[in-house]
């Protein structure tokens, strides 16, 4: 907490300097928060796009710096801009139909069935490390629209409450809840289809 | 995760673990230089744009004044009576086929 209080005025000072025309001062902000932004972007965007999206985040930050009301809350504001940029990345891809939905392979289908069959919690974690988990997750995400993708990331994968997710995305809690409901319907339809049919 | 189907919940535990175990990615120095280059380009283009915007604002602010000035000058010119009334009367009463643009200069 003390550390935060010590760094907050520094951010305000740097931001003030940038707003007064010292573009070079922005590099201090960039150096300070680049890892923070990369970490968020890396959780929501494919690896080969992380650099570009992170770059877009800092461009947006620079362009919107005048709109920042409380320089002390820069980190929270930056986090919101980062999530918004990730969301816009998916919206752009979704609109341009760059996300082909392929069928699951038999290995991936087997992995789903092994995972949902009765086993200990330890087993799930071990299975989670498997390559198939990541592949099935990637496949699953292609079935969702950009807003649902953000909700699944924040609520189901990062474990935030719907309220916290709504706060970060700048949406209403009801909106997040509705999307979470739709995600569950889609998951039920796609992941458990085979088993429920039998 | 409270309302999720228990079988889906199992899958999500696996997904969460996979999500957490995504390899970390760190920015390079080259990436930082690229960002700063874009920021500097943006800063220079922004200053040019702001000058243009300032001129545009001035133009819009001055346009009602300019319009007013044109109206006043127009009314003043009409009242100056550069062409005498008798010439205008003659122009109207005489046959239009005899009128040419140079008639007033003759």
Image: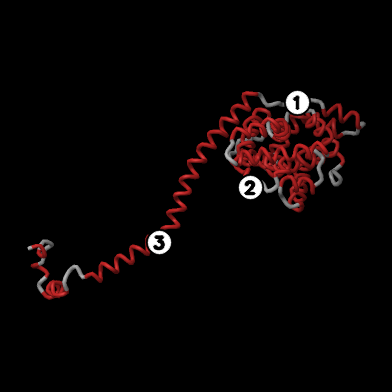
Q: Which residue is mark 3?
A: B65
Pick out the residue farthest to the right: A120
Mark toward the viewer: 3 or 1: 3
The alpha-carbon separation of the residues under discs 3 and 1 comes to 64 Å
Quarter of the picture holding the N terminus of chain B: top right
Tell me what residue is drawn at x 81 percent, y 34 percent. Answer: B16
Q: Which residue is mark 2?
A: A67
Residue A174 lies left or right of residue A21; in this view the side is: right
Tell me what residue is drawn at x 10 percent, y 73 percent. Answer: B94
Give above or below for B72 relative to A137: below
Give above or below for A109 relative to B70: above
Q: Secondary structure at mark 3?
A: helix
Label at residue B23: 1
Query: Percent x, y for residue A4?
Result: 79, 38
Q: Nearer the viewer, residue B85 or A113?
A: B85
Badge 2 and badge 1 both on one subunit: no
């Amino acid at each position: 907490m003390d550390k935060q209080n010590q760094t907050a005025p520094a951010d305000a000072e740097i931001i003030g300097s940038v707003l007064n025309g010292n573009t070079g001062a922005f590099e201090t902000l960039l150096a300070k928060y680049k890892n923070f932004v990369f970490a968020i972007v890396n959780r929501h965007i494919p690896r080969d796009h992380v650099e570009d999206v992170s770059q877009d985040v800092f461009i947006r930050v620079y362009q919107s710096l005048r709109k920042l009301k409380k320089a002390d809350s820069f980190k929270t504001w930056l986090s919101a801009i980062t999530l918004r940029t990730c969301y816009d990345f998916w919206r752009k891809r979704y609109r341009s139909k760059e996300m082909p939905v392929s069928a699951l392979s038999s290995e991936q289908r087997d992995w789903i069935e092994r995972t949902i069959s009765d086993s200990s919690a330890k087993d799930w974690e071990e299975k989670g490390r498997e390559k198939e988990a990541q592949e099935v997750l990637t496949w699953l995400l292609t079935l969702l629209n950009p807003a649902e993708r953000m909700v699944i990331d924040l609520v189901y994968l990062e474990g935030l409450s719907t309220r916290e997710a709504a706060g970060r995305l700048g949406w209403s809690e009801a909106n997040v809840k509705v999307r979470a409901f739709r995600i569950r319907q889609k998951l039920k339809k796609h992941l458990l289809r085979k088993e429920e049919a039998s | 995760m409270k309302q999720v189907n228990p079988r889906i919940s199992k899958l999500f535990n696996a997904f969460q673990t996979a999500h957490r175990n995504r390899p970390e990615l760190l920015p390079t120095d080259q990436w930082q230089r690229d960002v700063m280059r874009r920021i500097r380009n943006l800063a220079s283009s922004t200053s040019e744009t702001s000058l243009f915007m300032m001129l545009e604002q001035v133009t819009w602010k001055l346009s009602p004044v300019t319009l007013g000035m044109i109206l006043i000058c127009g009314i003043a010119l009409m009242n100056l009576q550069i062409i005498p009334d008798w010439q205008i009367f003659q122009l109207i009463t005489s046959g239009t086929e005899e009128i040419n643009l140079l008639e007033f200069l003759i």
